[in-house]
Amino acid sequence: PGVKKNLQRTLTSWGRTFLDGGGEQRGSGRLRGQLLFLLAWFHAIVQERRTYIPQGWSKAYEFSVGDLRAGAIVMDTVSRGPQLDFKLIHGLMEDAIYG
């Protein structure tokens, strides 16, 4: 239930305009939407895992809206390119955003 609420909160806060690309032509609209949903889902999972800090994490870290915003910028940027590079996305998410 926590993941579902977190996803709903994120998607509602982004709004339809942001999810549709702000009215601009940015890459494939469907691909962009899928990437943003994937990011929202991942962020919700990470948020829920905080409940299990002693077992699941070596140290406490508060993942915030800033992390989600940075991830959305990365997803938006990579969806504009001609090829989707999942290694690049994985590396940026792992090292730069949620590392």
Image (spheres, rainbow, N blue to C red):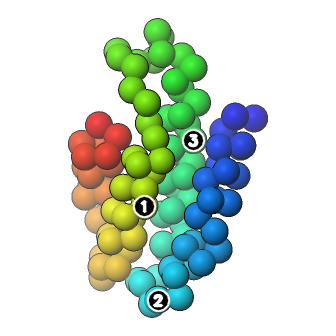
Q: Which mark is residue 72?
A: 1
In the rendered image, the vertical position of residue 46 relative to residue 65, given as above or below:
above
Q: CA distance from mark 3 to mark 2?
A: 27 Å
Circle nearer the N terminus (1, 2): 2
Going 33% across and 71% down the picture, which residue do you hit? 77
Residue 54 in the image, given as x and y percentages of width and height = 46, 9
Circle nearer the N terminus (3, 2): 2
In the rendered image, the vertical position of residue 94 relative to residue 78, given as above or below:
above
Q: Residues within 10 Å of mark 3 (few under 14, many from 20)?
A: many
Query: Residue type at mark 1?
Result: Ala
Can the viewer see residue 73? yes
Kindly identify which residue carries mark 3. 44
The secondary element bearing badge 3 is classed as helix
Going 72% across and 43% down the picture, which residue do you hit? 5
Residue 87 in the image, given as x and y percentages of width and height = 27, 55
Q: CA distance from mark 3 to mark 1?
A: 14 Å
Return the residue found at the far right: 1
Q: Which mark is residue 52?
A: none
The secondary element bearing badge 1 is classed as helix
Q: Are marks 3 and 1 in contact (CB under 8 Å)?
A: no
Query: Residue type at mark 2?
Result: Glu
Kindly identify which residue carries mark 2. 24
Circle nearer the N terminus (3, 1): 3
In the drawing, does residue 6 fall left or right of residue 95? right
Going 32% across and 70% down the picture, which residue do you hit? 78
Viewer-side residue, 36 vs 70: 70
The secondary element bearing badge 2 is classed as loop
